Amino acid sequence: MARAIAGLYVITDARRPRRVALESAVESALRGGARVVQYRDKSDDARRRHQDAKTLATLCRARGATFIVNDDVELAVAVAADGVHLGRDDDDLAAARAALGPGALIGVSCYNEIERARRAAAAGADYLAFGSVYPSATKPEAVHAPLTLFGEARHFTDRPLVAIGGINADNIASVITAGADAAAVVDAVFAAPDVEQATAELVACGFGPAPD
Ligand SMILES: Cc1ncc(COP(=O)(O)OP(=O)(O)O)c(N)n1
Ligand SMILES: Cc1ncsc1CCOP(=O)(O)O
Ligand SMILES: [Mg+2]
């Protein structure tokens, strides 16, 4: 069943612009064990963004994976995504909830700010993301978020906690041990020469063998 925020959470890389390549890369990530897919594309090519998001929404639905659109509430509604991810420069949570409805999954970036997480949880966020937990080549300007935030946040919310930023096979176990329910990655999956194998390795290192 779709809609859970747990396990390996992969985020697409708009530096790989072709739709067929994008679709096949995401398909490989799903075969490797990714459970959540976020479509992240900062371009202003609305037509491509709509086509890509529609393609990935269909793919994720068929595979039972959760599909999230980054930033763009309108696009999430248009392609019937499972939800949207919002940061401090994006729509606010109440507006997104009004547009997407009570069943949508709305994730909120909390950076390294525990008070922002507390407010987002109280306002009804469905998951909270902290990062960058390690230096990120995808977003080198991101603030550093210490792993202690996951334990702190667990005191006031039972919502899923997501770690993001510079996560790879060597360090993914550390973020799960710290209390993250999901690990979000771009490069560790989509910059890998073999996307399926890289995904499977991350899943094995972070979440252990799949149950029978
Ligand atoms: C799962 C997840 N966590 C954090 C982010 C970052 O969101 P934001 O701060 O809005 O930055 P951009 O991704 O929009 O550059 C994310 N996208 N996903
Ligand atoms: C969107 C975002 N926000 C904080 S780090 C990051 C990028 C994560 O990408 P990578 O897994 O390649 O470090
Ligand atoms: Mg954003």
Image (cartoon, helix red, strand yellow):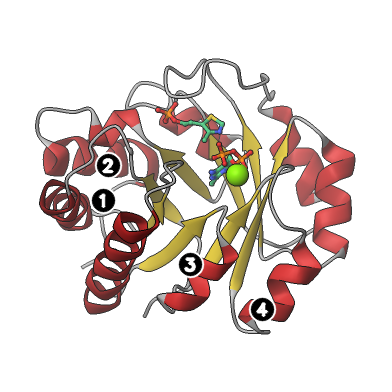
Q: Is residue 134 left or right of residue 157?
A: left
Mark earlier in primary sequence (3, 4): 3
Residue in the picture at 44% in, 79% down: 80
Task: Please tell me how crowded label 1 is: few (under 14), some (14-19), or many (20+) other residues with Cα within 10 Å.
Answer: few
Identify the disc placed on residue 75: 3
The secondary element bearing badge 3 is classed as helix
Quarter of the picture containing the N terminus is: bottom left
Mark earlier in primary sequence (4, 2): 4
Residue in the picture at 45% in, 76% down: 78
- In the image, 200 versus 55, the foreground residue is 55
Q: Which residue is mark 4?
A: 99
Q: Which residue is mark 2?
A: 204
- In the image, 43 versus 126, the foreground residue is 43
The secondary element bearing badge 4 is classed as helix
Identify the disc placed on residue 93: none
Q: CA distance from mark 1 to mark 3?
A: 35 Å
